[in-house]
C-alpha cells in the first residue's frame, strides 16, 4: 500500500494508492521507506523508527542538513526539488530498495537511539 499526503491533497483511493487529506503519522511505523521533504519531524521520526528515507530537498539549510546527514549515515538518499520527476523518484526508490545497507544502517541507528536514556538524547540535540 502507498499512502500519499501533501498540503491540499484530497482524500481518495486508486488501487493501492491512498491519498490522505491530513498527515497520519501512525501509518509511518512499519513503512518500507518514507519519502518526505526533509523536515525535522519526519526525519527524526523515520530515524527513530529505523525506516530508510528518501528526502526531497529544496536547498534550504535545515532540509539540506537532514538530506546530507541521512546520506552520511547511510539511512537515506536525496534529490533536489528541481530534479524531481516520476522517473527520477522511481530510480532513487529502486536504488534504495535494492541495497539492504540502508535498512541495516537505519536499524542500527534505531538500536543506538533506544540504548540512550532521555538525558543523553536531549544532550545530543543540543
Image: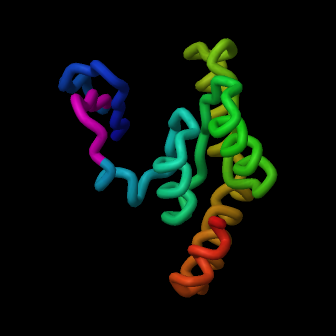
Residue 80 appears in the figure: yes
Which residue appears at 69% of the width and 15% of the height?
A: 83
Return the x and y of residue 97 as percentages of the image width and height: 63, 45
Indicate the position of residue 11 as horizontal and vertical percent values: 18, 25
Residue 50 in magenta stretch: no
- The quadrant in which the N terminus is found is top left
Residue 94 in view (yes/no):
no
Assess whether residue 23 is covered by the magenta stretch: yes
- Residue at the extreme front of the image, as rendered: 126
In the picture, measured across the screen, residue 73 lies left or right of residue 85, that is: right
Is residue 69 shown left or right of residue 88? right
Find residue 2 and report its horizontal and vertical position in percent: 37, 36
User: Which portion, as a residue range, is magenta?
Assistant: 17-24
Quadrant in the rendering for residue 75: bottom right
Task: Report the residue at 56% width, 16% height from top.
Answer: 86
At a point 30% along the width and 32% down the height, the residue shown is 16
Specify whether 24 is left or right of 72.
left
Please name whichever residue, 11 or 41, is drawn nearer the observer in this view of the structure. 41
> Is 123 in front, or is 13?
123
Amino acid at each position: 500500500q502507498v499512502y500519499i499526503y501533501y498540503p491540499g491533497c484530497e482524500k481518495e483511493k486508486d488501487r493501492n494508492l491512498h491519498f490522505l487529506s491530513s498527515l497520519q503519522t501512525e501509518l509511518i511505523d512499519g513503512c518500507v521507506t518514507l519519502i518526505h521533504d526533509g523536515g525535522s519531524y519526519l526525519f527524526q521520526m523515520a530515524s527513530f523508527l529505523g525506516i530508510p528515507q528518501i528526502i526531497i530537498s529544496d536547498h534550504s539549510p535545515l532540509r539540506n542538513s537532514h538530506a546530507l546527514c541521512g546520506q552520511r549515515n547511510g539511512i537515506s538518499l536525496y534529490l533536489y526539488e528541481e530534479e524531481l520527476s516520476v522517473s527520477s523518484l522511481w530510480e532513487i526508490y529502486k536504488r534504495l530498495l535494492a541495497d539492504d545497507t540502508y535498512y541495516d544502517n537505519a536499524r542500527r541507528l534505531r538500536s543506538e537511539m533506544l540504548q540512550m536514556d532521555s538525558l543523553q538524547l536531549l544532550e545530543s540535540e543540543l
